[in-house]
Amino acid sequence: TALACVATMSIRIPTPGTGGYIHPGDAIVILSGVVLGPSYGLLAAGIGSAMSDLLGGYFVYVPITFVIKGLIALFSGLFTEIAKDSKSRYVAVLLGGVIDIVLVAGGYFICEFFLYGSSAAASIPANIIQGVGGLIISSYCTRY
């Protein structure tokens, strides 16, 4: 939980449109599911990421972040449980990264659409970049 919070708050690159930011926390979200399993990963990633929104002043995003980041860790954990060997575990991490890209870009867009209207689309490219960064970092970490 603490790692997800700190990784999310450590580096913040502001994004246009919704006032959000790109951060390396998604790598910890994916790895939470891989290392802790689906249930504990969901809680660690969801609570840690939501805590970073709470501490950072993004109050409206706290429940949204909890659900989206928790689901990413849940799916990452489920994919990892299915994996039988190290090669398929690596594929499971990559699938978790793809789920991250889809849920972060799509999930936040849907929620932000109700908050900001069509200008929420401005956050999609930045959320895709953030998801790709999380995929790269988490897949690199699982190589060793």
Image: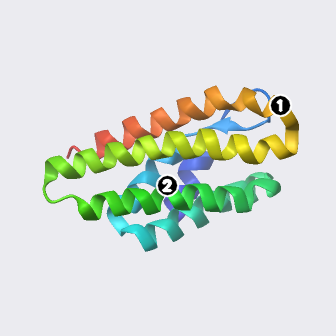
From the viewer's side, name the closer residue of 25 and 85.
Answer: 85
Question: Is 13 above or below relative to 114?
Answer: above
Question: In the orientation shown, which residue stands out farthest toward the bottom?
Answer: 39
Amino acid, disc 1: Ser
Residue under the image location 56 percent in, 32 percent down = 128
Residue 142 pos. (x, y %): 26, 47
What colour-coding does the image apply? rainbow
Residue 101 shows up from this direction = yes
Secondary structure at badge 1 equals: helix
Residue 1 pos. (x, y %): 52, 65
Query: Where is mark 2, residue-wise?
Result: 72
Quadrant for residue 41, please give it. Answer: bottom left
Which numbered dot is residue 118?
A: 1
Residue 15 shows up from this direction = no
Residue under the image location 86 percent in, 45 percent down = 115
Secondary structure at badge 2 equals: helix
The answer to which of marks 1 and 2 sits earlier in the sequence is 2
Question: Is 131 above or below relative to 27?
Answer: above
